[in-house]
Image (tube, rainbow, N blue to C red):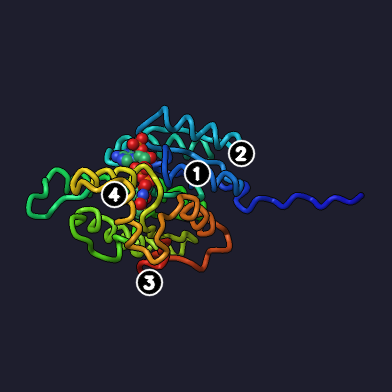
Amino acid sequence: MSTTPAATPPLQQRRAVVTGASRGIGRAIALALAAAGADVALSARSQADLEQVAAEVQALGRRALIHTCDVTNPTEVAQMAAAVIEGLGGVDILVNNAGISASHRFLDHPDEAWHNMLAINLTGIYYVTKAIIPTMVAQNYGRIINIASIAAKIGARYLVAYSTTKHGVIGLTRSLAAEFVSNNITVNAICPGYVDTPMTERSVSNIMARTGMSEEKALAALTATTPQQRLIESEEVADLTVFLALENSKGITGQAINVDGGAVMY
Ligand code: NAP
């Protein structure tokens, strides 16, 4: 009886770093990269949550490193980058996923909330990428995937800080794509609509608290913004991340691709 040899996983030998890997989209991305064959370094602030995800990565037969780090702190980011580069022996794939959301009316927008949003969602990507990209330049290979949002392409009331940071993520993505094109490094952004994660659970709770709506109605208010009338699953974002990380996605760079059920068509 002949047996067909198992196909080599497409990201075998690849080494990935995922920020915000402790839950939600980041966790799904870490697991999808591992399922595709990559070893994965997981970063976020919560050690206990990272340990759970690391166990799931290891159950898929891949190496998992953990390094806690607040992306707003350049010293912690530099320490994380040095540790994962040493631990994995280099980095081929960087997924900048860590982020927060918050909604405020502009007329009484707290300055602290503005600065905090920029620090995490935008400057955090700047720090992490600056710390990791030299190793990609040295090895003449890299895949950087930034998790933006459809709020990177449209404005929305009460989301001025979030939308501003996500628009910034696209500018950063395109500029890095242009600057590192000759280093065989691609840089792309993914723009999800509302995804079924703890972040969206908090958004639903906020709508309920502000409007008195039931959970069902608050959720319906969010899904009504998409033609498919549903939340996106984290795994849908994770699968596109894996695709952009493939060797043969080398022709795709400087792009910002929506995963939003047709809500925004550019
Ligand atoms: P989530 O469930 O709240 O998870 C956010 C992740 O970011 C956690 O792992 C969190 O870990 C980490 N994080 C937050 N602040 C951090 C900091 N200062 N330093 C390091 N890590 C930090 O959110 P999610 O829904 O998975 O969102 C992930 C990304 O997708 C975000 O960039 C978000 O803007 C984007 N996105 C989400 C949606 C959505 O509907 N959910 C839609 C479009 C885009 P710790 O708290 O342990 O640090």
Q: Secondary structure at mark 4?
A: helix
Report the residue marked by disc 4: 121
Query: Going 38% across and 60% down the picture, which residue do you hit?
Result: 191
Distance between mark 2 and mark 4 Cα atoms: 30 Å
Report the residue marked by disc 2: 60
- The amino acid type of the residue labelled 1 equals Ala
State whether residue 53 is above or below residue 24: above
- The amino acid type of the residue labelled 3 equals Met
Residue sitting farthest toward the bottom: 266
State whether residue 256 is above or below residue 236: below
Residue 166 picture location, percent across and down: 29, 57
- Label 3 neighbour load within 10 Å: few <14, some 14-19, many 20+: few
Question: Are dots 2 and 4 in contact, CB under 8 Å?
Answer: no
Q: Left or right: where does residue 6 sit relative to residue 82?
A: right
Q: Secondary structure at mark 1?
A: helix
Distance between mark 1 and mark 4 Cα atoms: 19 Å
Query: Going 46% across and 52% down the picture, which residue do you hit?
Result: 233
Report the residue marked by disc 1: 30
- Nearer to the camera, 164 or 159: 159
Report the residue marked by disc 3: 265
Q: Image quadrant of ligand 1?
A: top left
Distance between mark 4 and mark 3 Cα atoms: 23 Å
Q: Secondary structure at mark 3?
A: loop
Residue sitting farthest toward the right: 1
Residue 260 picture location, percent across and down: 40, 62
- The amino acid type of the residue labelled 2 equals Leu
For marks 1 and 4, the one nearer the N-term is: 1
- Nearer to the camera, 266 or 134: 266
For marks 2 and 4, the one nearer the N-term is: 2
Distance between mark 3 and mark 1 Cα atoms: 28 Å
State which quarter of the image contains the C terminus. Answer: bottom left
**Nearer the viewer's eye, disc 3 or disc 1?**
3
